[in-house]
Amino acid sequence: MRSLVLAFCLMLVATPAVAQDHVVSPVNWMWDLRGGLFIPDIDSEFGGAATPYADIFGTEKKMAWRTELSWQFYRGIGSLGVGADLGMFYRSGKALLDDGTKSGDGTSLILVPMGLKLVYRFDWLQTALHVPLTPYGKAGLVYNFWWITDGDGDVATWGSGDGGGRASGGTYGYEFALGLSLLLDFFDPEAAANLERESGINNSYIFVEWVYNKSDNFGGDGALRVGGTMWMFGLAVEF
Amino acid sequence: MKNSLNLLLFLSICVVSSTGWGNFSIKARYGTLPSAGGTALTAVQIAQHTNLARCLCDQWSEENDPYSYYFEMQYTGTFDSSDVYFYLGNDCANTAVALTECAEIGALNINSFQDRTNYIPIPVNHLVDPAGGVCRSQASSSTYYIFSNLENRTVAFSQGVSYDTKAPAAPTGVRAVGGEGSLSVSWDAGAVTEDRVSYFNVLCAQDGAPAPVSSDDTADWVDTEDVCGKVLSLDATEEGESCPDGALTAGGRAHPCYVCASVASTASSVRITGLTNGVAYQVAVVAVDDYRNASPLSEVVDATPVPTTDFAEHYRNLGGAADGDYCFLATTVYGDRDHPFVRVLRSFRDVALLTNPPGRAFVRWYYRNGPAWAAWVEGNPLALVILRVLMLPLVLFAFLTLTLPLWLPFAWWAVRQRRRLRREVSHA
């Protein structure tokens, strides 16, 4: 086992010959697609006194998806970029009967988060030492569009007390993330070089990141709290 | 669809005899005689034509031509005074088979084809049962013959015709659960896949009669009332009521007037809406095949729509404060809660106003007075137009504020670029 770990460490610090030989085109953009299990913080509004989200959708986490495009405007010790991302989260459940049991009607919550972030990637390890691991961090503002559907699949209404207002809107907040990406080119430098020649994709990564999203209109009243924390996994390419 | 195409190919092949006669060919197929307003049938219509309903109608009225459909036949070749004989059946050209096993359609003098087209009836009941003309539950094919010599069974033309009078099996595992003014009905779809089912129709009854949401326009099968204007029993021996009460009985015959929903065969559930909470309904399902034959009724289940609480209502009932949207005046001015300008103002309220004490105070004041202003503006078209214009700068300001993080970096970048260009120009 120890020899396996040693071999992996040697592999990480080893310098792939082909990677050094080919001419590297400029890198300015990064695109990623990622997903992770998520549950929004909606019930936190009630301080434990009630759990409307859990009552209808349960406490099981569901997949949330995000995609992000970032432009790297600084390259030095690492890279700094500005990125915009767009996501999707859908959760469906059953509406409740008067006795609190589930009915045959469906109801769902849809979240579409949009964000604008600063992204710092400490890729010096990769560029200077040829270690294929890049830690990174992101921080920025998010705006979450959301809407709730009723049994007919239409946007639900809050009820007669609210003048029949539609249960849709948006919640502002902020988000930061810490992650670690693994350069896939390292494992097959020749294929990576071909990919760069043919499509302009310089590097490709798989990554894992921890995301903290605080979306509550910055503590304002009347916000549907749709933030939360999650681990996300994904694939990214630099070009 | 695949079956219909097969049928079309099947019908398109003309077999011509080699006994010195000319060629018979099928030009088109008609639902009724062209002189009676008939139109050429599509492949799908032919498939639907040779189903149980057509068969029953033909059986009910052997003498009534319009119930049959027709081959529009033409002949090119030698004309003389000899007769040709039209038969339907299987293996009729075999002299070992008695002609009584085949259905005699009629005889025509070959000269009757000179300069004209003849329309030859195809009674489906004799396709299904050449000797007796009795409708049976089966799917097969039969052959249409033209004999130039009956004694020798000399075939001048023959044509295979497919039919399907076999109803699919009734759906099983039917369940119905009450929802808000609705019923969610489901069934085990897999049980009838081998019968080439193309639709499932749900039937709804209230107190034994068709439910208010039921309509025969929704039904996907062809019944005898559609084809020959009569509601016939399954043995075509008597007429029934068009839409009888109490007709929702397990294993019974489906009546289209009860149909309240239709879904494709890939579905195994449907939600029936427009019902009344607290009222009991009876529900059953039928399967409809490619030839528009309907299965017997499934088991009949009872269910009652009940009030339900969706997530938005549950959240609000428990004291949730999010309101998402409601903008009295802007909604009135722009006429729609989802107008893009109203959405911008709503977001501005959430982000710029509700996040600070003065903003929250303004929103409270606006919510106290907004409804009254909205009511006044609604009754004054001139004020409506003026406000639409006057609110535009407010909408623009709100939009720019909300999108500040998006355009500010680009503005900053643009300013820097402009400065750099100026510097370069001045250096030059």
Image (spheres, coloured by chain):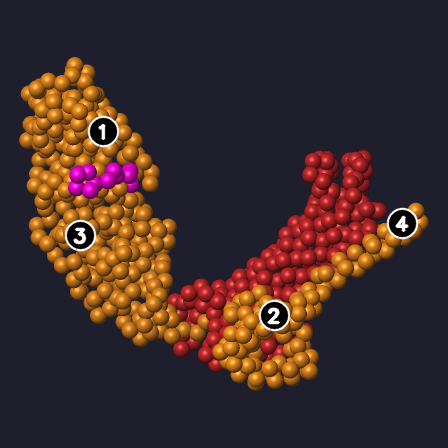
The Cα atoms of the two marked residues, 3 and 4, are separated by: 88 Å
Could you say which is closer to the camera, residue B284 or residue A220? A220
The residue under label 4 is which amino acid type?
Answer: Val
Residue A238 in the image: state x and y as whole percent: 72, 47
Q: Which residue in the protein does label 4 denote?
A: B425
Q: Which residue in the protein does label 3 denote?
A: B225
Position of A79 with respect to B190 (left or right) is: right
Chain B image colour: orange
Residue B130: which quarter of the image? top left
Q: Are marks 3 and 4 in one subunit? A: yes
Q: Which mark is residue A160?
A: none
The Cα atoms of the two marked residues, 2 and 4, are separated by: 43 Å
Residue A121 in the image: state x and y as whole percent: 77, 54
Earlier sequence position, callout 3 versus callout 1:
1
Q: Are marks 3 and 2 in one subunit? A: yes
Could you say which is closer to the camera, residue A37 or residue B155? B155
Residue B312 in the image: state x and y as whole percent: 50, 73
Q: Which mark is residue B26?
A: 1
Most extreme residue toward the front is B382
**Residue in the picture at 27% in, 67% down:** B212
Q: Which residue in the protein does label 2 denote?
A: B389
Q: Are marks 3 and 1 in one subunit? A: yes
- Please, what secondary structure does the residue beneath circle 3 have? helix
How many other residues sit within 10 Å of disc 1, few (<14), some (14-19) or many (≥20)?
A: some
- Look at the image and give the residue range highlighted in magenta: B33-44
Residue B241: which quarter of the image? bottom left
**Residue in the picture at 47% in, 75% down:** A164
Mark 4 or 1, which is nearer the eye?
4
Labels 2 and 4 touching (C-beta < 8 A): no
Earlier sequence position, callout 4 versus callout 1:
1
